[in-house]
Image (cartoon, rainbow, N blue to C red):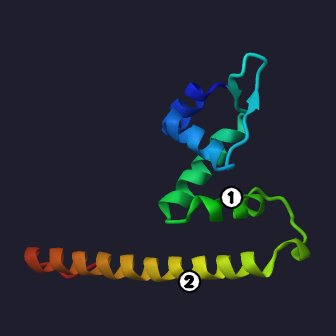
Amino acid sequence: MRIGELSRRTGVPPRMLRYYEEQDLLRPERSVNGYRSYGEDMVHRVRQIRGLLDSGLTTEIIRRILPFLDGMLVHPDCVTPEVTAMLNGEAERLTQRIDCLSRNRDAILAYLAAISGRRPA
């Protein structure tokens, strides 16, 4: 499929898809006329990238972890201490973010319950 179709199916603008390619997150095939050609599996890949970006990960981190998320088994010796430390740091940062979001959700629900006379869920 061409970039416009991938954009339509994923909701990600073509400009952003080209950015993902620049960041080495996507690797489309090129036809003889130079047009990008994406396989069906790229729909899942783009949605996966979008979700990881939405969770706060950088494109550098996403580029490093995509092979692990695609179900490809990587020998443990291939994972450097640097990547391991980076992933541990990101996992901790996400845990802190989840905790913060949970506290904010609970506060909003408590406020809504207080103003409506109901108990929080």
Q: CA distance from mark 1 to mark 2?
A: 19 Å
- Residue 2's label in the rendered image is none
- Could you classify mark 2 by the number of other residues whose Cα lies within 10 Å: few (under 14), some (14-19), or many (20 or more)? few
Please tell me which of labels 1 and 2 falls first in the chain: 1
Query: Which quadrant does the N terminus fall into?
Result: top right
Location of residue 6 (image quadrant): top right
Location of residue 77 (image quadrant): bottom right
- Residue at 54% of width from left, 56% of height from top? 51
Q: Position of residue 93 (x, y in %)?
A: 52, 80
Dot 2 lies on which element?
helix
In the picture of the structure, the residue carrying the numbered disc 1 is: 63
Judge by depth and name the residue closer to the eye, 49 or 112.
Answer: 49
Q: Nearer the viewer, mark 1 or mark 2?
A: 1
- Could you classify mark 1 by the number of other residues whose Cα lies within 10 Å: few (under 14), some (14-19), or many (20 or more)? some
In the picture of the structure, the residue carrying the numbered disc 2 is: 92
Q: Do the numbered discs 1 and 2 sit on residues whose CB atoms are within 8 Å?
A: no
Q: Is residue 100 left or right of residue 31?
A: left
- Up-down relation of residue 77 to residue 69 (above or below): below
Q: Position of residue 104 (x, y in %)?
A: 30, 78
The amino acid pointed to by label 1 is Arg
Dot 1 lies on which element?
helix
Q: Is residue 43 left or right of residue 70?
A: left
- Residue at 44% of width from left, 77% of height from top? 97
- Up-down relation of residue 26 to residue 96 (above or below): above
The amino acid pointed to by label 2 is Glu
Location of residue 69 (image quadrant): bottom right
Q: Is residue 19 left or right of residue 119?
A: right
- Residue at 72% of width from left, 40% of height from top? 41
Q: Position of residue 72 (x, y in %)?
A: 84, 59
